[in-house]
Image (cartoon, rainbow, N blue to C red):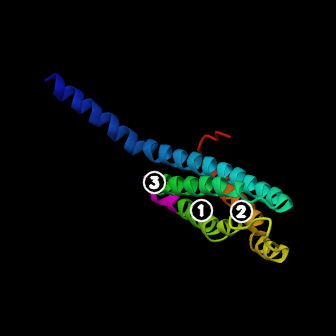
Amino acid sequence: MRKTNKITGLLYVIMLFSSCGYYAHKQKQVLVEQIRNTNDSLDKMTKEWHNLLDKAVKVKNFSALNAQRIQIGQFLSRRRSVIANLELPADAETLRGSEDVYLSAQVGMVTDFYPQFELFNDLTPDSTIQYHLRLVSKDVETEVSWYLTIKKSLDVFVIKNGIKNTK
């Protein structure tokens, strides 16, 4: 009899939370927090890599770039998985899709362009270094542009859904 009452009570609580939208609201809150944390960290790591690149070009020692690139790549891989596996209501899918496009673009940059610098040394001609610098010159601008675009989308999403702003 006691087990039946506990199960009935638990089912009642679950139905109450489901019917009032609490669970969907909580899912949206988690998505917003995950995206903000991901984008803030990615922005910081991207800028750190570019600072290291600037220093490497001056002294022609590119060895420090490898560790930072690997760290960014691992971070992107983990965060894409986390965000992709969040259970979300249908109206949050667009936001997750935008984040995935952004992270995919950064994965492309990290895997296609960043590693080229790791092969350089003090014998690498300046013209080769300058050519590759032009290839990544828009990276920070593009990253910041995406960051701000998604931040605006998040702000609208937070207001529209009445989500408690954690930042």
Residue 129 appears at what percent x and percent y? 79, 72
Residue extending farthest to the left is: 1
**Which image quarter holds the N terminus?**
top left
Closest to the camera, between mark 3 and mark 1, is 1
Please check the rendered image and state whether residue 6 is part of the magenta-colored stretch, yes or no: no
SS for tag 3?
loop
The residue depicted at 52 percent of the width and 45 percent of the height is 30
Residue extent of the magenta highlight = 87-93
> On screen, 19 above or below 127?
above
Q: Marks 3/1: CA distance?
A: 18 Å
Label ID, residue 70 = none
Q: Counting other residues with Cα less than 10 Å from the Cα at mark 1, is it few (<14), some (14-19), or many (20 or more)?
A: many
Q: Amino acid at mark 3?
A: Leu
Residue 143 got which mark?
2
* Foreground tag (3 vs 2): 2
Q: Tell me what residue is drawn at x 70 percent, y 61 percent.
A: 149
Q: In this rendering, would 114 be left or right of 88?
A: right
Q: Which residue is mark 3?
A: 88
Residue 7 lies, in percent from the top left, at: 22, 31
Q: Which residue is mark 1?
A: 103
Quarter of image, res 152:
bottom right
Q: Residue furthest top?
A: 2
Residue 89 included in the magenta stretch of the image = yes
What type is the residue that disc 1 sits on? Leu
Q: Is residue 166 visible?
A: yes
